[in-house]
Structures are given as C-alpha cells and as structure tokens.
Image: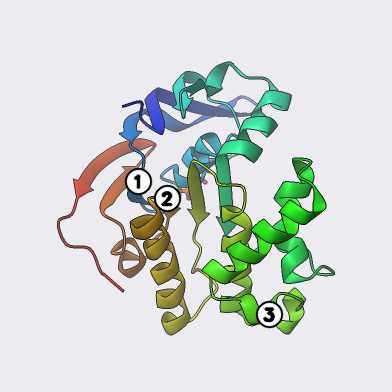
C-alpha cells in the first residue's frame, strides 16, 4: 500500500545573511494510513520545520516528500495550496478560528474555499460539529466558547474536508489537564473509529502517550522511532 506520508532524506537549510542553519539534516520515515503519531524533541530540534514541510507550508532544500502518492517537493506554491486544502486538516495550539463567525461558519470555511455548495456545506459542517460533541453550540462565536470548545470547533474544521491526514501542532498547549485529556480523547476516537491518520507535535510526554508511535527529533535528525503496544486509552 502507498504510504500516506513518505519522507526520504529530507533537508531544510535556512539562510540568515551569511549563516546557514541546518534545521533538518536527512530525515526519512513513512506513515501509513490510520497511524497516530507523535513527534517529540527539545526546542530547536526541527519539529516545526518538519511540520511546515509535511503541512505543505514550505518546501524542502533537498530530499523527497510524497503525500498520498503526490510528489510534493516538485510542486509550486499554487499547487501546494491545493494539496494542502484537499489532503490536510490543521489543528493549532491557538485554535485560529475567525472571531466574528459562528462555529458553523468556521467549520464551513474549508468547504467555501473549495467551492462546495451551500446545502452540502451546511450538512457536512453540522455533521463534523456533531462528531466533536458541539451540536448544541453551532451558532456560538469563538468568544462565547471555552478553550476546549474552541479546539473542538477547530478539530471539526480540520475534519470537514475529509483529509488524508490531520496535523496537530501542540493542540493542547493552551488547555488545562482535564480539557487536554478530552481533546486527546477526541483525536484518539477519530483515529480508532474512523481510521483517520493523525500526526501530532508535542513536547509533553503525557500528550504523546495517546499516540501509538512516537518519533523523537534531535538536532535536525530523527533519533528514535518507537511503536507502542500500549498507549493511553480514553
Ligand atoms: P522546534 O520546533 O523543534 O523548536 P524549529 O524547527 O523551530 O525547532 O527550529 C529548528 C532550527 O531551525 C532552530 O535552530 C531554529 O532556530 C532554526 N529556524 C527555524 N525557523 C527558522 C527560520 N525561519 N529562519 C532561520 N532559522 C530558523
């Protein structure tokens, strides 16, 4: 089976004046459909750089990246945006919801961008909000929702386009312990029940403990790739 994500000898070098920063120095791994992966590592180890490349927000300096069979490293910025919209769902630490729009409208946004018609959009967004337990808050705006509820809306927005992968960057970084566990429980349930592929960046071991496989980065390299037989189960 074609891996959902295949990275081969990925390099990323930033240039700042005369100085080169080798943020990724030959990273290779594959992620199969239905995996739940956490990427860990100390600050500066290259996690954000790696997520930006996987998320088609940036291109590698060298190496190959295939996402769902597409050769991403060969694409220009317009095609990268298309691949991003079709194949990826993003969940960020700060939710990144539109403040003036309702939960429903926020979740509809990726479908508006894709030109999906009004009735279908409404139906799919309503379903996605139901999946994350937000059916009774669809008309609330972000400032009328708790942090955990806003993150649920953000997960619904990530889900609504039926992406190949959900990329979650420190999704519980702004939440208390109990709410973090609820949010991780939702991601885990989506992974287990719907076979959704989840890639998560975190520096917290108790958040990574929900994943079935943990990749550890250090100094721009993958130093550990551990599959677990027993992850935390909500
Ligand atoms: P992490 O997310 O693990 O903290 P990053 O991917 O942000 O690590 O950073 C990896 C290395 O690349 C660090 O040395 C960082 O300073 C450097 N870096 C990250 N982004 C840039 C950039 N836009 N320009 C120059 N250097 C950068």
**SS at mark 3?**
helix
Cβ of mark 2 under 8 Å from ligand 1: the answer is no
Residue 34 is labelled as: 1
Residue occupying the far right of the picture: 100
Characterize the local packing of mark 2: few (<14), some (14-19) or many (20 or more) Cα atoms within 10 angstroms: many
Pointer 3 local density, CA inside 10 Å: few below 14, some 14–19, many at least 20: some
> For the N terminus, which image quadrant?
top left
Residue 201 horizontal side relative to residue 104, left or right: left
Q: Which mark is residue 196?
A: 2
- Which residue occupies 65% across, 39% down? 85
Q: Which mark is residue 95?
A: none
Residue at (50, 36) in percent of width and height: 54
Query: Quick one: quadrant of the C terminus?
Result: bottom left
* Rendered view: 89 above or below 9: below
Residue at 81% over, 53% down = 118
Q: Which one is earlier in the sequence, the residue at label 2 or at label 3? A: 3
Circle 1: element type = loop
In the displayed structure image, the side of residue 202 where residue 70 appears, left or right: right
Report the residue that reaches farthest toward the left.
229
Discs 1, 2 touching: Cβ within 8 Å: yes
The residue identified by callout 3 is 137
Callout 1: 10 Å neighbours few (<14), some, many (20+)?
A: some
Comparing 215 with 14, the one in front is 215
Please tell me which of labels 1 and 2 falls first in the chain. Answer: 1
| SS class, disc 2 | loop
Q: CA distance from mark 1 to mark 3?
A: 29 Å
């Amino acid at each position: 089976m074609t891996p959902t994500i295949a990275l081969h000898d990925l390099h990323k070098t930033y240039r700042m004046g005369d100085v080169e920063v080798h943020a990724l120095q030959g990273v290779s791994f594959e992620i199969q459909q239905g995996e739940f992966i956490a990427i860990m590592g100390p600050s500066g180890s290259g996690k954000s750089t790696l997520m930006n490349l996987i998320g088609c927000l940036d291109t590698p300096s060298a190496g190959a990246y295939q996402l769902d069979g597409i050769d991403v490293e060969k694409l220009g910025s317009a095609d990268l945006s298309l691949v991003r919209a079709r194949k990826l769902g993003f969940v960020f630490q700060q939710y990144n919801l539109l403040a003036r729009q309702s939960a429903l409208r926020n979740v509809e946004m990726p479908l508006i961008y894709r030109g999906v018609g009004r009735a279908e959009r409404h139906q799919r967004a309503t379903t996605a909000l139901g999946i994350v337990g937000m059916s009774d808050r669809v008309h609330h705006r972000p400032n009328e929702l708790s942090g955990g509820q806003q993150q649920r809306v953000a997960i619904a927005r990530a889900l609504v386009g039926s992406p190949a992968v959900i990329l979650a960057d420190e999704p519980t970084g702004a939440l208390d312990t109990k709410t973090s566990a609820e949010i991780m429980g939702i991601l885990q349930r989506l992974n287990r029940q719907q076979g959704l592929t989840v890639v998560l960046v975190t520096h917290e071991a108790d958040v990574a403990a929900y994943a079935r496989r943990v990749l550890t980065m250090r100094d721009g390299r993958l130093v550990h790739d551990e599959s677990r037989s027993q992850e935390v189960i909500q």
